[in-house]
Amino acid sequence: MGDSPLREPEREEEYLTEEADAPETKKMSGKARRRFWETELLRLILYLLVLFTVTILFIRFVMQRTDVSGNSMLPMLEDGDSLLVDKISYRFRDPDRFDIVVFPFTQSEETFFIKRVIGLPGETVQITEDGRIWINGEQLEEHYGLEVIRDPGRAVTPVVLSEGEYFVLGDNRNNSLDSRRIEVGNIHEDQIIGRAWIRIYPFANFGFIKHQ
């Protein structure tokens, strides 16, 4: 019987001590929580800044999405196709014949053309009245044209390409504004943004663009 009265005060003292310490513990936890959320907010801001910078650099130097508007590249590309344009390859090599390239229309800052390279720098291009394409006096063997060219345009007489110049045509030869027209003319290498790389939409036609 003598042990019981001695234990009760100890338990009560421990209980009161815990109660007295509780406000301090809560106060410290509140400061810790604020520091935690401040740190997380700073990390989020830094992450978004890095993500924004990487995205801008990616679009500027590596890849760009573009949508096809019109039917000048039928049957290869259709109106409404969404493409990724490779902007880095031509930093290491020149465009090849039959590459599909994207470049701005000089008479409209917000308009971009997508056409196929036919003539290369230093070559002479001519399109005869019967629709055949001649490169340096030899007929070009190609199968990209949707149909026989009816209007050779300015290429009815030989077009001499200077250094860095390319002659481009749309695959839908009779429904394309291209190098046959003086308002487009020869395309200089500095104008070329990149080459069509992947069709990402419509999903049923997803895949790499065949150039050759």
Image (cartoon, rainbow, N blue to C red):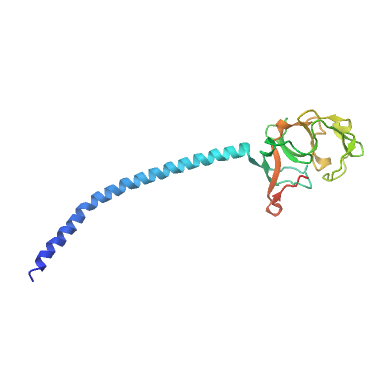
Q: How many marks?
A: 0
Instruction: Specify the farthest residue to the front.
Output: 92
In the image, residue 19 above or below residue 77: below
Q: Which one is nearer the viewer's eye here, 84 or 80?
A: 84
**Residue farthest to the right, as pictured:** 130
Residue 181, picture quadrant? top right
Instruction: Give the residue drawn at x 55%, y 40%.
Output: 54
Q: Pick out the residue farthest to the top.
A: 162
- Quadrant of the snapshot with the N terminus: bottom left
Q: Quadrant of the C terminus?
A: top right
Residue visible at 30% across and 49% down in the picture: 29
Residue drawn where x is 73% and y is 47% of the image: 209
Q: Residue at x 81, y 43 (%)?
A: 172
Residue 137 in picture, x, y percent from top left: 90, 34
The spot of residue 4 in percent (x, y) is 11, 68
Q: Residue furthest left?
A: 2
Question: Relative to 5, is 167 on the left or the right?
Answer: right
Q: Quadrant of residue 64?
A: top right
Seen in the image, is 151 located left or right of residue 84?
A: right
Give the percent coordinates (x, y) of residue 150: 88, 39
| Relative side of 92 to 50, left or right | right
In the image shown, does 163 or 192 lie closer to the viewer? Answer: 163
